[in-house]
Image (cartoon, rainbow, N blue to C red):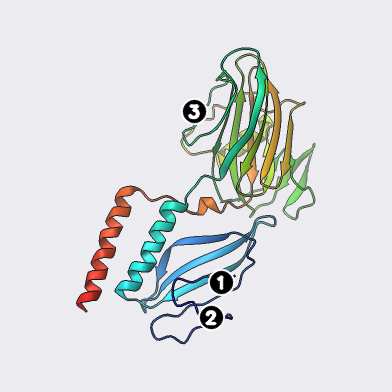
Amino acid sequence: MAICLADCKASSSTWLPNAHRRLHFFYLNSHLPLIPYLPPSIDNSGLIFASFENVDQHNNKRIGKVTMPIYQSAKIWLAALTFTLLSSAFSARATLVSIDNCSGSVTEGPAISCEITEDPPNPITKNPNNNKLLAWDEVQNHTLTAPLQVDRVFDENASFISDAGNGDYFIATGTIVSSHYVQWDPKKRGSIAADIVLDSQVFAYITSDANLFASDSALALPGIDYNDFNLRGLESGDSTLFDGANTAIAWTASSPGDWTRLITAYSPAAEISEPAPLPLFLASLVLIGLARQGKRK
């Protein structure tokens, strides 16, 4: 597959001999996600570079890219930068995608519910007692600077997984990971089943007190008080099944509830941050000014 912004005439990986625009193509595996890296860079000759990469989520590697340089002119600036702003404005989304098939039973309190939030509780309390499965994204696309100790992995034979002893595993230094926190606390006693859908391969989960405490500094959402209380992990009979980017859970808890940290691969969605309305408006004014300057010339 190949993509371009303008004058798409190439049939191979070559530079186009065009006095006004040159596009460099790399053909990519079309079944893998194409990740935009924004905003484009500008070199001394006035070329605008917009870069995209393909990511092999299973092996956690970037495997190809397309870079598109375009000579400077007011119209080209307008097209390229508008493309950049609109892409960042409308493509941003959380890497926790959905919680499906939410069901269960409780002995007291409100009906069971499942929710993804961008506004997690702060501080996290030992007994929210709300019969709610609550999940939120933590640090995304973090390159590990030390081995990460986890309780369970999707594939103990993966190249970046090693045995940590006592039933635990290490995810290797240098691996790109994203973290997601899941909380379940019934008012008295209850069970819940749900399918947690993410945007990339699930590598592992962290649920023992020691491993949760140890991973808070690297993976926790900044500004949140995780209130490191004991017994916040899963129960021995709880079930957590990995299936690619999906995790099927069946948990039972009383007091305190269940907390776990899901660790996933590089997250395509997390690369794009949503611009605030004011910067987007100001950038639009700049683009209009550039277009007018081009007309005067």
Q: Position of residue 157 (x, y in %)?
A: 80, 51
231 or 240: nearer the viewer: 240
Type of residue at label 3? Pro
Residue 210 vertical position relative to residue 159 in the rendered view, above or below: above
Label at residue 10: 2
Residue 164 in the image: x percent, y percent? 76, 43
Counting other residues with Cα less than 10 Å from the Cα at mark 1, is it few (<14), some (14-19), or many (20 or more)?
Answer: some
Q: Disc 1 marks which residue? A: 2
- At numbered mark 1, what does the secondary structure look like: helix, strand or loop? loop
Which amino acid type is marked by label 2? Ala
Rendered position, 64 above or below 24: above
Q: Residue at x 45, y 80 (%)?
A: 22
Q: Secondary structure at mark 2?
A: loop
What's under tag 1, amino acid-wise?
Answer: Ala
**How far, Cα to Cα, is label 1 from label 3?**
44 Å
Q: Is residue 162 left or right of residue 290?
A: right
Q: Is residue 62 above or below residue 158?
A: below
| Disc 2 crowd, CA 10 A, few/some/many (<14, 14-19, 20+) | some
